[in-house]
Image (cartoon, grey):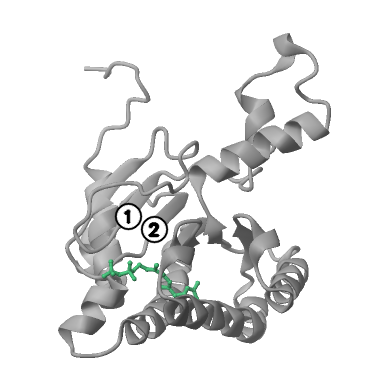
Amino acid sequence: MNEENRQGMKIPVHIAIIMDGNGRWAKRRGMPRTFGHTQGAKVVEQILEDADHMGVKYLTVYAFSTENWSRPQTEVKALMNLLRRYMKTSLAKCAKNNVRIRVIGDKSMLDEDLQASIANLEQETASNTGIGFQIAINYGGRDEIVRAVRRAAGQGLLDEIDKIDESVLDSCLDTAGIPDPDLLIRTCGEQRISNFLLWQLAYSEMYFTPKAWPEFNREELLKAIDAYNHRERRYGGLTNE
Ligand code: FPP
């Protein structure tokens, strides 16, 4: 898509991505699955920059699900090491690009050193005012809702039944304060949500592409945004026509 076609395009405020197909992409090249993840991590960094330049305000990526622990230990370890490296090396870049990082998911299950680097990165970038970058690690949508209910109960927010509403639960989710995604992108052909942002995706537009995550780039992101521009969002209401 050339620059002219992009003029007047509506840019989603929040884009969520299920980065699928790292393993298949690597296997097709006769490489180990972990090579796909390494390549995938590079793509994440590039897409964050591209999304930011396009004017996207929030980007949320699914890096490791609550179900991913059942993968072979070597793969789990490689993914954790990639995330570990990312948390350590991205601080300078985030400072330069004004990126604010938040990790969503149950962090208590992660190794202590990783938890510490995440806390450090979140703290150091908390007052940045540019794009919000959410990384889902040990994340499951159902698990997040259960943890939100527990948090709400712990704060006494469920004591009066009449006062329980969507905003109460919303404020106890890992994504509290972040608007729901306008657009969900999933790569590599599968067309399902896989326990990602179950609450937040209620009215999001879905975009599926056969491209594997390591092949995803700025051009593919623009295609997804273009498709989004051709959707009519009704939020359960009627059109004006
Ligand atoms: C799905 O591909 C991808 C993952 C489970 C991991 C995604 C992680 C990264 C892209 C790297 C780390 C991220 C950051 C933020 C630095 P798959 O392994 O399920 O592929 P397959 O479906 O082809 O097997």
| CA–CA distance in space, label 1 to label 2 | 5 Å
**Which residue sits at x=22%, y=78%?**
25
| Contact? badges 1 and 2 (CB < 8 Å) | yes
Density class for disc 2 (Cα within 10 Å; few <14, some 14-19, many ≥20) is many
Where does the image place residue 106, in percent across and percent down from the top left?
A: 63, 55
* Residue 24 tag number: none
On the question of residue 63 being in view, the answer is: no
Work out whether residue 169 or residue 31 is closer to the camera in this orientation and state it.
31
Q: Which of disc 2 and disc 1 is earlier in sequence?
A: 2
**Which residue sits at x=31%, y=81%?**
33
* Residue 185 tag number: 1
Quadrant of the image where one finds ligand 1: bottom left
Q: Amino acid at mark 1?
A: Ile
Callout 2: helix, strand or loop?
A: strand
Tag 2 residue: 17
Name which quarter of the figure residue 222 lies in. bottom left
Density class for disc 1 (Cα within 10 Å; few <14, some 14-19, many ≥20) is many
Left of 214 or right of it: where is 87? Answer: right
Where does the image place residue 55, in percent across and percent down from the top left?
A: 46, 60
Work out whether residue 117 or residue 71 is closer to the camera in this orientation and state it.
71
Name which quarter of the figure residue 16 lies in. bottom left
Q: Quadrant of the N terminus?
A: bottom left
